[in-house]
Amino acid sequence: MNVETIKTGKCPVCGSLEVYDNRDSNQSGDRKYISVSAMYSFGVEAYVCLSCGYFKEFIRDSDISNEKLKEKVKEKWNRTSGGKIE
Ligand SMILES: [Zn+2]
């Protein structure tokens, strides 16, 4: 995957390297977790560019590679269909 992403440490909007994330922070933000079911939830990681204010959240990598959790999402959430792609 060769997508411009703030995860590289370079802001995709302004090109600044003043990018920070809260991955290793123990501080709990407003949206540290997103519930999927009673047993499962996504961990949320936030990235911010301190030059332009660009802000992006991702589900943490370990959850995106967790097949049980992803099966739960497919069971509980709707598959997104915007109408353009059939
Ligand atoms: Zn920026």
Image (tube, rainbow, N blue to C red):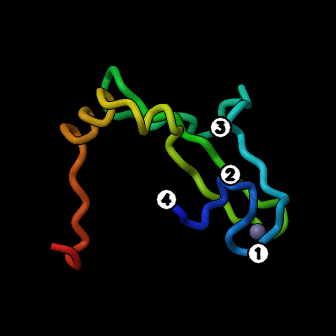
User: Which residue does the image show at 22% across and 54% down from the upper left?
Assistant: 79
User: Which residue does the image show at 71% across and 39% down from the upper left?
Assistant: 22
Could you give the CA–CA distance between mark 3 and mark 4, rounded to whole angstroms? 29 Å
Could you give the CA–CA distance between mark 4 and mark 2, rounded to whole angstroms? 19 Å
What amino acid is at disc 2? Tyr
Compare marks 2 and 1 and give the one earlier in the sequence: 1
What amino acid is at disc 4? Met
Is ligand 1 within 8 Å of the beta carbon of the residue shown at mark 4?
no
Element on which disc 3 rests: loop
Q: Residues within 10 Å of mark 1 (few under 14, many from 20)?
A: few
Q: Quadrant of residue 34?
A: top left
Compare marks 1 and 4 and give the one earlier in the sequence: 4
Q: Residues within 10 Å of mark 2 (few under 14, many from 20)?
A: many
Q: Nearer the viewer, residue 35 or 25?
A: 25
Give the number of the mark in front: 2 or 3: 2
What amino acid is at disc 3? Gly
Give the number of the mark in front: 1 or 4: 4
User: Which residue does the image show at 78% across and 49% down from the upper left?
Assistant: 20
Residue wearing tag 1:
14
Residue wearing tag 2:
47
Residue 79 sits above or below residue 64 on the image: below
Could you give the CA–CA distance between mark 1 and mark 4, rounded to whole angstroms? 21 Å
Could you give the CA–CA distance between mark 1 and mark 3, rounded to whole angstroms? 25 Å
Could you give the CA–CA distance between mark 2 and mark 1, rounded to whole angstroms? 14 Å
Q: Position of residue 14 (x, y in %)?
A: 76, 75
Q: Position of residue 84 (x, y in %)?
A: 23, 79
Instruction: Name the mark on residue 29.
Output: 3
User: Which residue does the image show at 77% across and 60% down from the upper left?
Assistant: 49
Q: Residues within 10 Å of mark 4 (few under 14, many from 20)?
A: few
Residue wearing tag 4:
1
